Image: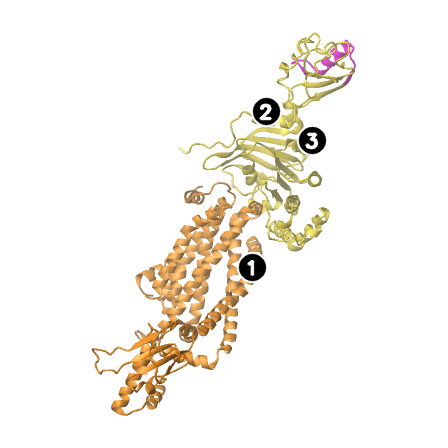
Amino acid sequence: MNKIWLITRREYLTRVRNKTFLLSTFLLPLVIILFMAGSVVISQQTRSRHRIAVVDANGYFKDYLKSDSTISFVFPPGVDSLNYQQKGCTAVLIIPVLQKDTIHKTIYRLKYKKQLGLEGGIELENRVNNAITDHLIFEQTRIGRGTLDSIRTRSDIAEMRSYEDQGSTVRESSQGSAFVIGYVSGILIYLLTFIYGAMVMRGVMEEKTSRIAEVIVSSVKPFQLMMGKITGIGAVGLTQFLLWIVLLAALGTIGQTFISAETWNEVHHLQQSGPMGGGSAAGVSENAARLSRIIIAFNNTNVALIVFCFLFYFIGGYLFYSALFAAVGSAVNEDPQEAQSLMMPITLPVIFSFFIMSVAVQDPAGPLAVWASIIPFSSPIVMMARIPFGVPWWQILLSMLFLVLGFLGTTWLAGKIYRTGILMYGKKPSWKTMWKWAFHK
Amino acid sequence: MYGPTRNKQNILELTGLVKRFTSQTAVDEISFQLREGSIFGLLGPNGAGKTTLIRMITGIFYPDEGSILFEGRPFRAETDILRIGYMPEERGLYKKMKIGEQAIYLAQLKGLSKEEATRRVKDWFVKFEMQSWWNKKVEDLSKGMGQKLQFVTTVLHEPRLIILDEPFSGLDPVNANLIKDEIYALAAKGATIIFSTHRMEQVEEICDHIILMNKGRKILDGSVTEVKQQFKENLFRIGIAGAAPPDEAFPRGAGLPPDEAAPSNSGAPPGGAAPSNNEASSGGRIPSSGDGPATFEVVERDDNGCVVKIKEGYSSNDVLEYFIRKGQPVLSFSEILPSLNEIFIQLVEGTPPARQFHSLQ
């Protein structure tokens, strides 16, 4: 036990003190933030304001077409499809006299020289339709546009909450946030399993190729060496993960102060009017929406359960797979390509679980999701995607029990392969030989 | 050297040790005892099973059959490996780890406390003039420097049994001597050393006792002197005053065929005696191989004397008597013992390659 602790400490300290660790820990969140900020900045810059000249044969669009920060409608006299560019417009909208016929619709045209990013979108069409609606309302009820706008603003007073009927009690459902939390947790576990599993494999390969393995196993048991490495790197993973959380939280708080109230309002507005037009605007709103949804979700969901389960499945999944990665690392020689081909049987179930996970967030109670969240090969990833939607206790407990049994099993198996593999040089072993190492007395 | 340690107890007793792998028997019924404080040579061609045997002694492998007694008790890997220091032939260190830290870490794995490990590492670094290396990484070291460091990490925990597999490979003569002196010093302090190598001249120089393995079996076991006695061919070198330069009274080759000495030379070791037999010249004074007395035959001759093989049933005094009678002044008389190299080659050569795989059927 003491020796596993010594090895764990070395594995942990050499990695945590390494410059690469510091760089990846502190730079990765910064890079993500910068990337996100950069894409927002770039999209805002490319989103030029369009001046669209309108040739209106009806005479009322001047009063009803709404201009805003992205599109402004102008009605210069004498404009036509030949001279709109001279009048400083990027496009011209030609609206003939509209017939009041909902079946044989009147065609109006947009002409432009340079792509606007609006042609195929429904944004322009919505504005024209809103203008027609407002005009017709005025024609028949004499209620003006100003009144209509103020009614619209004041009518935003209701919000829907849906509840899941659970017999005697009801639970507030939060499908949207559950989806996000489930998906993000699933992806995180998937990524972390790979990142740290591969780290274990590289560590084992390093010990083997640098020939220190034989020196060490003359002092400790191979199993202790393997376990020390797994726990040490697992601790590195937890540390890195917690640092990322802290960093992201800090950066998020700082980032919030940089978002102006105007942007918040715009975001809010965009959110209400649904997905419209250019992805650039949606970029801002979705980030904000995700943030707000996560905030709401934190209030609505069982955070303690999710955090506990996340840590459990992260550690369990890591132990389950890293032992297998260690076994592969012990079997290969110097050649990284050998590692690639031997890794296949391990990476396949992980990737497969990822696909099941993306199904599970859509249908969290379906039989595929349920079974995949109980079988230990896929349970860490799939169960995390299901937990935010609410999972029966017996399923969680069974899944956890199987995961514990699973990683005890893989560790035992890996230990046997590792013991032989770590001292074997020469030919690349096949899975058959590794099987023999594991089960041959 | 072997003699005085005879009273001490056996630090290691192996009985009928067998280790089989799927395709071959790597170690086949090996038994031997190892006296405390001796320097023991484990010899054998490549693939003879030395490494497997060592791995069983260091607790890395469990034997399939047989028993290991360490310090008189059955070997228990968990605790006994702390009293063993092993420097494998394929040695390695963590390349990216600082040297001082690494030495301390390896000592801690052998059960030393951190303070004790630090103190001892510092002592050894001073002894080997390695203090300035402390914060360097292994990847910055030359091969020889790495070797010294490896030796330090092997003996740091003051093991009772030290196993060194080719400890001098890659070392220059100065550093090799440094390590050699440390090996002697450790043995003098009572540590037992197993020394595995192919370099026979080193074995002859350092070891008291040797074992020769081939194809998993022990084919030779004894002290260096015993083994040499066992394989001696009753060859003696006799230095004779004025063994006749060729241009003297007896012209070169006169009276006997010049190549007559050559055929009888076949049994003699190459390089065991004087360079060659092309000076078969001193006919009159030294009997040629054909003629001469019944007591011995001349195997080789040169300007300074000759090499003779004493025939069965006669002693060296019979030979001396012959020369004295002939009135030829004998200046020197010494026995030629075979070198371990010759014994090794004689025993191993001609046997099929060591790593023969059995058919799996």
Which residue is labeled 1 in the image? A20
The stretch in magenta equals: B307-331
Q: Is residue A166 above or below residue A331?
A: below
Q: Is residue A339 left or right of residue B176?
A: left
Q: Residue at the location (54% across, 46% down)?
A: A209
**Neighbours of disc 2 within 10 Å: few (<14), some (14-19), many (20+):** few
The answer for how far apart the CA atoms under marks 3 and 1 are is 58 Å
Q: Which residue is mark 2?
A: B346
Distance CA(mark 3)–CA(mark 2): 27 Å
Chain letter corresponding to the colour orange:
A
Residue B298: % across, % down: 68, 14
Subunit of label 3: B
Location of residue A303 with respect to A193 vertically, above or below = below
Q: Report in which chain the residue with disc 2 lies.
A: B
Question: Dot 1: within a 10 Å radius of its alpha carbon, few (fewer than 14), some, or many (20 or more) residues?
Answer: few
Separation of marks 2 and 1 at Cα, in angstroms? 57 Å
Image point (31%, 79%), residue name: A94
Q: Can you say whether A7 is above or below A264 in the image?
A: above
Q: Residue B23, located in which quarter of the rendered image?
A: top left
Q: Position of residue B12 (x, y in %)?
A: 60, 37
Q: Secondary structure at mark 1?
A: helix
What is the drawing colour of chain B? yellow
- The residue pinned by badge 3 equals B3
